[in-house]
Amino acid sequence: MLKKPAARSSRTFNVANRLPVEYRDSGSWSTSPGGLVSAMQPALHHLDAVWVGWSGAAAPAGPHESRPAPPDDATNLELIEVAMTRAEVIAYYEGYCNSALWPLYHDAIVAPVFRDDDYHAYCAINLRFAQCVATRAPRDACVWVHDYHLQLVPRLLRVLRPDLRIGFFLHVPFPSWEHFSTLPRGDDLLEGLLGSDLVGFQTAQSVERFMEAVHHLPNVRRQGGCLEVSDGDARHSVTVGAFPIGPPAQLYDKASTTRVIRDAAASIRAECDEPELLILGVDRLDYTKGIARRIKAVGAVLKSPEFRHRRIRCIQLATPSRTALSTYQALRRTVEDTLRTVNAELAELGLAPIQYIYEQRATDEIMALYVAADVMLVTSLADGMNLVCKEYVASRPNNDGRLVLSKNTGAAAQLTDAWLVDPEDTTDIARGLGDALRASATEATHRMQALRQAVFDYDATHWADSFLAALHTTR
């Protein structure tokens, strides 16, 4: 066991698969994509925090290769990089994390792929993260571990550094027992999570699914919202709860009123020929997002007799994601084939095509899209929370936007005033979109006011503060 440092500290160690900045092939560092980073950075701004994570690039292959350290001015946080070789990236990240766990935790929308070598790499990387924190964290430090990439870290840390206060938060949905029970060595992941003092989820449903899963372990006993865990002669209590994540709402609200963002939004609308209504989709290109079915639904609405004569336009931004995986390559072909078919049908009627953008856009460009759009369309087949819909709401200070939202997002439990749809039913997506398009300005304003109240009450700072406050009461 590693020796405990003598000094005491109130520092928070934020441990995630990715750093808030990533290293590019061009030799420069830039902001990492993804909802976790966009939510976490402002939430940790007021804390004495260290961020431990991977740079997003494989470690230099030889002793004569090097790359610059993350820039000191990239973030207000101290950054500690955990390195991985290219082989480890393939087995741990592309393999176990995103070919096994990601599809499994999203209702097995595509079949998970389980390989022993990938699991062994997952174990090795989790141990590397745990050892990194264990050797650097002062005595009694608070450690906040994030997401499905690092589910073994809490127990490893408990063994290495029992003085640490350990919290874990899962950003994706926790799967049903029907799906989780198919995971080889799934009990190892559960035992890993049970090394925490606090385990947090996005929704009450995920909490109950986790409770059902650990119920099958002989060393766990449930007591209300807590679990009593036996580990040899030792016992400890694990608190379990729902902590729905939010965006930095004030940041989006303030940015949406600036001249730069509003001018950029005006340019977007001008490029779309000043539409009466502009529909927007913003997603990573992932099979959980339901983009192909959404495109079909938009096409059906635009072609319908009710709407075909109105000046309605649609933009779909798809950010490239996990491009090395064959599943994602096939998904891109499916989405773009669907788009070509729908656009050809629209062209036959003399209608404007759906504009498709396949590239990563900067945060300010996405903010401009939010401000430009009259209708936000989010149709995820499965989503732990979905921050895009909340960011859009936060960007509507005049209460003039309309949100069409999948019932299968964690956000749907909070944003009940959106037009909720079944993302697996193209007809129902079209129905919800049509209802939003034909809604009066009064109805849209009433709904948006309620949505903004929910988003601002439970923003990124509230999420982080409530989780850490709960963590500090666990011992």
Image (cartoon, rainbow, N blue to C red):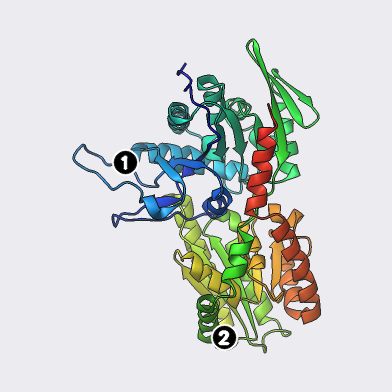
Q: Residue at x 57, y 45 (%)?
A: 103
Q: Residue at x 74, y 70 (%)?
A: 448
Residue placed most toward the observer, 358 or 228: 228
How packed mark 1 is, by other alpha carbons closer than 10 Å (few <14, some 14-19, many 20 or more), is some
- Which disc, if any, is residue 59? 1
Where residue 262 appears, as percent x and y from the top left, is 55, 79
Residue 188 shows in the view: yes
Amino acid type, label 2: Glu
Q: Residue at x 55, y 69 (%)?
A: 367
Query: Left or right: 333 with respect to 375?
Result: left
Residue mark closest to the camera, 2 vs 1: 1
Query: Left or right: 350 with respect to 91?
Result: right
Residue assigned mark 2 = 348
Query: Between marks 2 and 1, how big is the CA–CA gap?
Result: 51 Å
Instruction: Establish if 334 lies above or below 111.
Output: below
Residue placed most toward the observer, 435 or 146: 146
Instruction: Establish if 432 lies above or below 179.
Output: below
Where residue 78 appears, as percent x and y from the top left, is 44, 44
Residue placed most toward the observer, 401 or 292: 401
In the figure, residue 80 lies in which quadrant? top left
- Which disc, if any, is residue 428? none
How packed mark 2 is, by other alpha carbons closer than 10 Å (few <14, some 14-19, many 20 or more), is few
Amino acid type, label 1: Ala
Q: Say whether disc 2 or disc 1 marks the residue closer to the N-terminus.
A: 1
Question: Looking at the figure, which quarter contains the C terminus?
Answer: top right
Residue placed most toward the observer, 103 or 166: 166
Where residue 282 appears, as percent x and y from the top left, is 56, 65
Per the image, label 1 sits on a secondary structure element best described as loop
Instruction: Establish if 385 lies above or below 187.
Output: below
Per the image, label 2 sits on a secondary structure element best described as helix
Residue 353 shows in the view: no
